[in-house]
Image (cartoon, grey):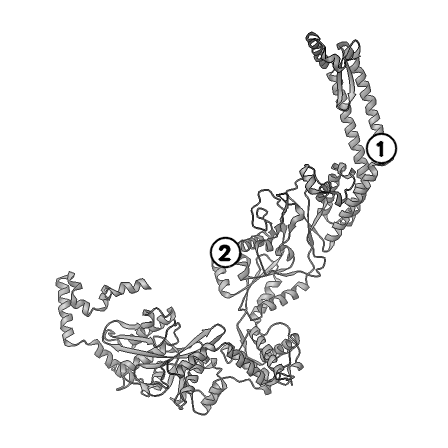
């Protein structure tokens, strides 16, 4: 089977340093963007350019592929082409203070508007004080009061004329018009009032009632005069104040004449100031004279608190923004996304107003782009629901029922929702995307673009050149020593090894960037000005050394004989299988001895790992496939009757995967045929029911793991590994193994079918059926077929017992559980054995 052996040049795809024309990476121009990922790039560009509702983007890819930085770069490039968004304000709703009003204003004008309004209020307070203390105002007010006094005096004179008939005199006091009883034509004093008789009192009260009835019209006229005075005084105040208010606010209106919301707010502001002119008449209190605690105790209100109603909340300030915003929210809680309302505890009372409304990431990203990590946003279910609701409604509503501390609030404000136009980009993995796409209907409506980042890229001239430029850029940005061509070539080979494909390069640039840093560190350690191939090799070796403690411990167990492993000689029913052990960031190959025992019975193939509950579902499936292969090959004219147990010897932890299914099949064929297997050869590969060999993962680690054991025990030129033909393109083996193969000390075979593998392992032909259905004489399949026939034929004594049992079963159906049936139960009766239900419960 020499034609199945791989040549040394097939064992890896070495990058030659002579392909590079530069002396060091310093000669290369820096690279901007990402290497490869054309599919993801086009999807991102498409999603960023579509402005219709629902075309948000989900970015799928593994960490370390550069997805985050690339998404940010492309988004920034797109954002620069777009104008800066508007500012947003929250202002007091003078008609309903519990529903603050949101106002959109041109970019950067929010600060100016606030400055104009604050200055106007400040000037108005000072101006009103001057107006209402001016001589003109006092004269006008005095004139109105005097007119009132004249009219009221006439009314009082008429009241006294009527009052004299009933013995009363009317007088104007601080409390208004009062009636005083007369005695001998003079007002009665308190002493005289106390000495009147009951008869005099009753007469006086009767006259008072008559007087009240007769003077109703005069009193109404007097009240009307008082009302007229109040109205005239108010009109005077409004007339004096409105001129000043309009002077200041009309100036602001002119500056923002194109903003209807601003004009409407200024109109409401003007009316509120006019309605509250009395507050403006008061002198502005000094801050150090105000004692909130004392004022609260006396039930007084801080006079300055009234003017809080005229403040303006600059909710979103884009004055420093030159283009569309790109916001990355690293902690997307509900409040960080949708905004919040803060509360102030004043003497145990929770208070809030429109000035305490705070924006969220959706507000800050309005008119631009919001980038989120899927794992973060999905960890906050309220935030995820809020995000979807905002995107569906195209507006953000702040839930005022919950404070930012999480406490429910009974009385609060409900700000006007703000319309949004934002493109949301969620970055996660494909598994999360598939779950959301399958179970979240709103996700399908909102995230119609998926940008999928590959884990590897084509190993072609273009990408290799870009890879070298990536190293150059990394050296420049991180201030590292530049790389020599041979050092770059070794990193290219390592990138191919990480991709597990001779035609690919890994897209995990983060990992490669770390190796660049570590290689630079070793160059500095050896006081070199450039990074050479030995520095890269040292970085890789040290990186491996930091993580391979468990591998060294495992290999020492092989060396000292604790793990039983034959790498020479021939044995029946035994074979060397290969597995990959993962320890976080490092994986290595570990050989394992697989043994098979076959004997008479009808239990079929028993997977001891499954019985011990140490195997996974895929491994169990692989073992079950063996039954299908045996049945197809050897049970076309009779039932398949055998019992075979398969086990990974000295396996004390779990195992999964079907990469050992072909290995187990070889051991099974060996035990059935009685033909020994060459213990120098280890095997990996999956098999199907037709005997075709299927590719597996971790082929490099498996070969290298077995090579280490063989080297430890001594290479003899016969040792090697059988792998699937499809895995040849995945080979990127250590140079030490390539050298050993070149020297004839080690071999790697690549096969397509089980028949090829069994011939390599045993040195005997697999055998084919002739037209009569008989296998080639003394071939592996012929020997297996004969053994299976033998196992299917029970001894004469057992045949007789089986016949008797069958007879009893027909005559007496209830006799199924008699001793003979239990001693040698058929397949259908195995469930009646006591251990069977116990095994089902354990599973």
Tag 1: Cα neighbours inside 10 Å, few (<14), some, or many (≥20)? Answer: few
Is 837 placed left or right of 195 in the picture? left
Residue at numbered disc 1:
138
| Residue 618 against residue 324 in the figure, above or below | below
| Image quadrant occupied by the C terminus | bottom left
- The secondary element bearing badge 1 is classed as helix
Mark closest to the chain's N terminus, 1 or 2: 1
Tag 2: Cα neighbours inside 10 Å, few (<14), some, or many (≥20)? Answer: few
Image coordinates for residue 515, horizontal then vertical, percent: 57, 77
| Residue 280 against residue 15 in the figure, above or below | above
Q: Of 549 and 809, which appears nearest the observer?
A: 549
Is 840 placed left or right of 321 in the picture? left
Q: Of 385 and 162, which appears nearest the observer?
A: 162
- The secondary element bearing badge 2 is classed as helix
Residue at numbered disc 2:
441
Image coordinates for residue 138, horizontal then vertical, percent: 85, 33
| Residue 401 against residue 817 in the figure, above or below | above
Residue depth check, mark 1 versus mark 2: number of the one nearer the observer: 1
Is 289 placed left or right of 634 in the picture? right
Q: Can the viewer see residue 45?
A: yes
Q: Can the viewer see residue 94?
A: no
The residue sitting at 38% across, 74% down in the picture is 658
């Amino acid at each position: 089977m020499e034609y199945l052996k791989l040549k040394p040049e097939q064992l890896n795809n070495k990058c030659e340093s002579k392909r590079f024309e530069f002396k060091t990476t310093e000669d290369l121009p820096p690279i901007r963007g990402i290497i490869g990922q054309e599919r993801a790039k086009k999807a991102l560009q498409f999603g960023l350019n579509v402005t219709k509702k629902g075309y948000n983007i989900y970015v799928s890819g593994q960490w370390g592929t550069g997805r985050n930085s690339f998404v940010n770069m492309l988004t920034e490039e797109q954002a620069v082409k777009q104008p800066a968004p508007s500012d947003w304000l929250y202002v007091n709703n003078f008609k309903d203070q519990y529903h603050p009003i949101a106002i959109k204003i041109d970019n950067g004008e929010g600060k100016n508007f606030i400055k104009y309004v604050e200055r106007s209020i400040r000037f108005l307070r000072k101006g009103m004080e001057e107006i209402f203390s001016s001589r003109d105002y006092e004269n006008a007010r005095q004139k109105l009061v005097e007119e009132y006094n004249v009219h009221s005096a006439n009314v009082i004179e008429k009241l006294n004329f009527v009052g004299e008939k009933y013995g009363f005199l009317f007088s104007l006091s601080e409390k208004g018009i009062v009636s005083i009883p007369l005695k001998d034509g003079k007002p009665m004093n308190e002493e005289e009032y106390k000495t009147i008789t009951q008869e005099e009192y009753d007469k006086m009260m009767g006259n008072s009632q008559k007087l009240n009835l007769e003077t109703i019209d005069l009193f109404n006229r007097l009240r009307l005069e008082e009302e007229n005075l109040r109205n005239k005084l108010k009109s005077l105040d409004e007339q004096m104040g409105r001129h000043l208010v309009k002077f200041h606010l009309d100036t602001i209106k002119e500056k923002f004449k194109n903003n209807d919301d601003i004009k409407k707010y200024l109109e409401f502001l003007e009316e509120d100031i006019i309605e509250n002119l009395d507050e403006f008449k008061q002198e502005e209190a000094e801050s150090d004279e105000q004692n909130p605690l004392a004022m609260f105790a006396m039930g007084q209100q801080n006079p300055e608190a009234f003017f809080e109603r005229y403040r303006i909340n600059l909710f979103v300030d884009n004055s420093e923004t030159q283009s569309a915003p790109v916001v990355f929210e690293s902690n997307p809680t509900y409040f960080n996304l949708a905004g919040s309302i803060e509360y102030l505890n004043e003497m145990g009372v929770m208070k809030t107003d429109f000035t305490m409304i705070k924006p969220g990431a959706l507000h800050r990203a309005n008119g631009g782009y919001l980038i989120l990590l899927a794992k973060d946003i999905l960890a906050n279910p309220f935030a995820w629901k809020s995000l979807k609701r905002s995107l569906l409604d195209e507006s953000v509503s702040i839930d005022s029922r919950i404070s930012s501390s999480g406490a429910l609030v009974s009385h609060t404000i409900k700000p006007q929702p703000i319309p949004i136009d934002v493109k949301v980009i969620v970055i996660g993995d494909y598994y999360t995307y598939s779950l959301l796409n399958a179970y979240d209907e709103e996700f399908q409506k909102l995230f119609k673009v998926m940008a999928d980042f590959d884990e590897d890229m084509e190993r072609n001239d273009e990408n290799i050149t870009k890879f070298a430029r990536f190293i150059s850029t990394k050296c420049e940005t991180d201030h590292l020593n530049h790389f020599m061509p041979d050092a770059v070539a070794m990193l290219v080979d390592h990138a191919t090894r990480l991709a597990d494909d001779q035609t690919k390069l890994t897209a995990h640039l983060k990992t490669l960037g770390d190796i660049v840093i570590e290689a630079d560190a070793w160059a500095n350690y050896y006081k070199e000005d450039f990074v050479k191939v030995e520095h890269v090799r040292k970085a890789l070796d040290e990186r491996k050394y930091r993580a391979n403690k468990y591998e060294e411990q495992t290999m020492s167990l092989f060396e000292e004989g604790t793990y039983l492993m034959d790498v020479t000689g021939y044995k029946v029913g035994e074979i060397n299988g290969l597995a990959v052990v993962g320890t976080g960031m490092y994986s290595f190959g570990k050989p394992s001895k697989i043994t098979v025992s076959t004997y008479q019975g009808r239990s079929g193939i028993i997977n001891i790992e499954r019985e011990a509950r140490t195997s996974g579902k895929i491994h169990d499936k692989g073992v079950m496939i063996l039954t299908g292969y045996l049945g197809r090959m050897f049970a076309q004219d009779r039932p398949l009757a055998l019992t075979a147990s398969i086990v990974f010897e000295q396996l004390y932890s779990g195992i999964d995967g079907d990469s050992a299914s072909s290995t187990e099949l070889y051991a099974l064929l060996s035990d059935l045929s009685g033909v020994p297997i060459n213990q120098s050869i280890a095997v990996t590969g999956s098999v199907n029911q037709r005997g075709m060999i299927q590719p597996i993962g971790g082929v490099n680690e498996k070969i290298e793991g077995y090579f280490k054991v063989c080297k430890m025990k001594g290479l003899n030129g016969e040792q090697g590994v059988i792998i699937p033909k499809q895995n040849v393109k995945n080979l990127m083996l250590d140079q030490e193994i390539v050298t050993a193969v070149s020297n004839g000390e080690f071999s790697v075979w690549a096969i397509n079918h089980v028949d090829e593998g069994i011939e390599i392992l045993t040195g005997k032909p697999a055998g084919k059926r002739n037209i009569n259905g008989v296998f080639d004489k003394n071939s592996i399949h012929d020997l297996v077929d004969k053994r299976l026939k033998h196992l299917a034929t029970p001894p004469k004594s057992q045949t007789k017992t089986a016949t008797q049992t069958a007879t009893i079963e027909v005559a007496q159906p209830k006799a199924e559980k008699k001793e003979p049936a239990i001693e040698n139960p058929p397949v259908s009766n195995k469930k009646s054995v006591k251990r069977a239900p116990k095994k089902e419960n354990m599973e």
